Image (cartoon, rainbow, N blue to C red):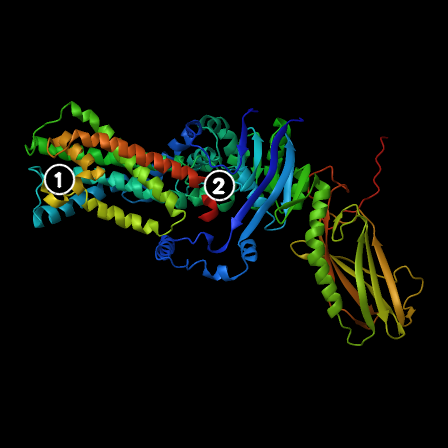
Amino acid sequence: MTEIALRVEGLSKMYQLGEIGTGTLSKDIERWWFRVRKKEDPFLKIGEINDRSSKSSSEVVWSLKDINFEIQQGESVGIIGRNGAGKSTLLKILSRITSPTLGKALIKGRVASLLEVGTGFHPELTGRENIYLNGAILGMRKSEIGKNFDAIVEFAGIERYVDTPVKRYSSGMYVRLAFAVAAFLDSDILIVDEVLAVGDAEFQRKCLGKMKEVSRGQGRTILFVSHNMGSILNFCQKGILLDKGRILDMSDIQSVVKRYTNLTQSSTNDESLQNQIKSFNDKRKLITIESISIVGSNQSIYFLNTSDSVKIRIKYNVTSEVRGLRIGFDVFYKGEIDYHIFRTFHDENETTAQGVTFSGNYESSITVNGDLFKSGEYKFVFIAGIYNSHMITTDEISFLLTFENIDGVNNNYKDLRPGVIMPRNDWKTIKK
Amino acid sequence: MSDEVRIIDSKHGKPSLFELWRFKDLLFLLVRRDFVAFYKQTVFGPLWFFIQPLFTTFVFILLFGNIAKISTEGLPSSLFYLSGIILWSYFSDCLIKTSTVLRDNAHIFGKVYFPRMIMPISIVLSNLIKFGAQFILFILFYVYYLISGGIKFDIGYTFFLLPILLLFMGLWGLGLGLIISALTTKYRDLSYLVNFGVQLLMYATTVAYPLSAAPEKFKFLISINPMSSIIECFRLILFDVGSFEWQLLIIQVLMILLTLSFGICIFFYVERDFMDTV
């Protein structure tokens, strides 16, 4: 298990932008004609006036820059990063679709890459014919496909339609068939790009299960790109975080995922929250919000473990003495529709109702205990109002918290529980 | 677990026959796909293989035989034209399809790796099936004229050279096609030139006329056109008409080897990076 399956050394990929390629024969002939007449190249003119160094730097983009890593045999590695981070370029180089500009990769064993499902499917051909064709395109021998044929058909659940042209298939059947072929790909290293985004949730789970089975069972090495952090966490042990063509982090998958979500969510989410706070304006000028900040039990702010408790601190200013002021949150579960789970106010634990708030600066904080939320997104809407009188806010300030079940309740099981929360309950079982 | 270690770096790949051989099943399946998809998609199915040469022959009889009255060296004109047309269309189909192979298959090449050379080879083989069907049509005509006394049977042992001629045609189409396909990744407009150029080249080839009927001052030009000598040789074997010099065959082989090896080299050169520019 300690053998190295893949080693990448100083891998870089450069793309040229702008006029370098010029593109057409006529332009190249035109250039040549200008050169013959000892005139300046018409396509270089604009650049020549400019500073040379700034020009050259603007026409070259390093999609990958000096990437180094090693992957042991049998490991499942998730590659994550924002759009344009270089994930796809890396996979393309490792799949030999394009070549690196600098550096090299050493790969041991047979590589199969799945950058798309159903590559080369022909609509006129039957399911049977497409299984063979697609399998061969992915690099399988005919005999291998023949050996797995029945299992592929069964996995896809298309027994009745094997001899029907795939153009008559429903889109679901089409994807299932395409994936089934790939799932039976026998290789030492499997490279998978965002292919699970297609297909229904149940089938995705089935596919992940199948890939995992193959991965654990036969010591197959897997490189996996997905934007679905759930499946990455579920599936990979290690993670590589790419950003702007460089490796930002490489370690166990949990910490890499946390770092990634921090990177993406904290910047966008936090910015929008600060903007909301800034633009919030109470018509009666009773209250002004100074800040709302989230303090999780770990470093990441908007991305949390289901076991983490959520601590939110609100700083605000009250301009004049008022009776019955309440601030708090409405919490929604972001499903297909938003479920209002609960509402909470800052004075819930007070002994008297409708207390008086004097003018001045205040800080209220709330801690929601861990193991209440399940994995998914929850929307926290800040509310403020005067008891039995009116609401001050109307949905102006809200933010999303994303939970992932890494070490919380039910993480021994892969089933997604119904319901909108998943509290840790005090179960006891004794044998009588 | 195989112990094979592959190195991926910026060096351009070398042609590997071993790798091509590993993908022979894919080659077979691609040829099959082309054939199956072709007859499934159309109403007349495989009949299309016959319709095209038949109609072209008909037009040629009308144009070159009846209006221009160009000699067919005493042969029934339909037989003369058909022999030229099926051989020529094998070459031109190979050339045109190969010359766009990288762009036509960009959606596959961009997603999965297999030796790109498989695709052009599959084109040459798919077209061979089509040629086979058309050759059967030709034989039917041949037998008809044999029975009705239009021609005399005059095929000797040279008949066995026919597959070689066919190989030449295929390799010409492949070689030139590879060069053009590699160049079209950089020069888009070349692909427009190809269709047009092939059409023009046909008139410089002895498809619709025998070499003997060509005007004196163009005769040399037409005779050094490799397609002409192949078609002339084809007719010589089947009907014992036409002119052909054996020295040309040697030159032919050399030219094919040169074109093909250049084509393969340039194709392998662009193969690794063309996805970045297409």
Instruction: Give coordinates of residue A5: x percent, y percent.
Output: 61, 30
- x and y percent of residue A414 in the render? 69, 39
Residue type indicated by callout 1: Leu
Q: Residues within 10 Å of mark 2 (few under 14, many from 20)?
A: many
Callout 2 amino acid? Gly
Q: Disc number at residue A118?
A: 2
Residue A226 shown left or right of residue A385 in the figure? left
Where the N terminus of chain A falls, by quadrant? top right
The residue where tag 1 is placed is B211
Residue B253 location, x and y as percent? 26, 31
**Element on which disc 1 rests:** helix
**Is A54 in front, or is B4?**
A54
Total marks shown come to 2
Which residue ends up furthest to the top in the rendered image? Answer: B157
Instruction: Tell me: A378 left or right of A33.
Output: right
Is residue A135 placed above or below A359 in the rendered structure? above
Residue placed furthest toward the front: A38
From the viewer's perspective, is A239 left or right of B249?
Answer: right
Work out which quarter of the rendered image holds the C terminus of chain A and state it. Answer: top right
